[in-house]
Amino acid sequence: MLSDKFPNLDPQSLSTLVLFMQTSHEIYNGVSSLLCEYGLSVGNLKILIYLFLYDRSLTPSELAEYSGVTRSTITSVIDKLERDGLVRRSTLTDRRMTAISLTDEGKQLMTEKIPKFTLLFADLMSEFTQEDHIYFTTLLQKLSSGLERIKE
């Protein structure tokens, strides 16, 4: 037993964490496979969702902050989305700031194809009651706090 070799180890904590990691990995892979059909990644989708929801141009810094990634990462994501014709770069009024917005093709993707994709998310979470969602969110926030603690 692991607890014999590691007396400080809580076997239930380890079991729960392993199950969470396996499940989140399967979800991520499943979502990634479905997004591949649209030529997108999870990172691409995050950017498109923010641009679609805000319905205005956003700066790369805003997109990086919303997505939780670095500025250099967001630049490569924007480059790919621009090559694919889903976003465009322009300048803001002071000409020193770049603005990113959806193209007509990007808007069409978000209004016609992504809603079908979100139905799959709804189906994935259909077993959850409203209380389950609240409790699960609380647990994920606790997990996130623990992650922040061990990063320090």
Image (cartoon, helix red, strand yellow):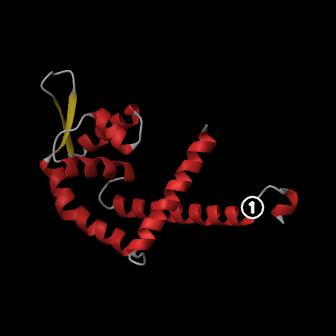
Percent position (x, y) of residue 25? 53, 61
Q: As drawn, is 55 to the left or to the right of 125? A: left
Q: As drawn, is 89 to the left or to the right of 60? A: left
Percent position (x, y) of residue 117? 30, 66
Q: Quadrant of residue 152?
A: top right
Percent position (x, y) of residue 95? 16, 22
Q: In percent of the image, x 48 and y 65: which residue is there?
A: 136
Depth order, front residue of 63/10 = 10
Can you see residue 133? yes
The amino acid pointed to by label 1 is: Asp
Percent position (x, y) of residue 148? 56, 44
Q: Quadrant of residue 97?
A: top left
Q: In percent of the image, x 82 and y 62: which residue is there?
A: 3
Q: Dividing the image into 4 quarters, which one contains the N terminus?
A: bottom right
Can you see residue 125? no
Q: Quadrant of residue 76?
A: top left
Vertically, is 18 above or below 126? Answer: above
Q: As drawn, is 122 to the left or to the right of 127? A: left
- List the residue tagged with mark 1: 10
Q: In percent of the image, x 41 and y 42: which residue is there?
A: 68
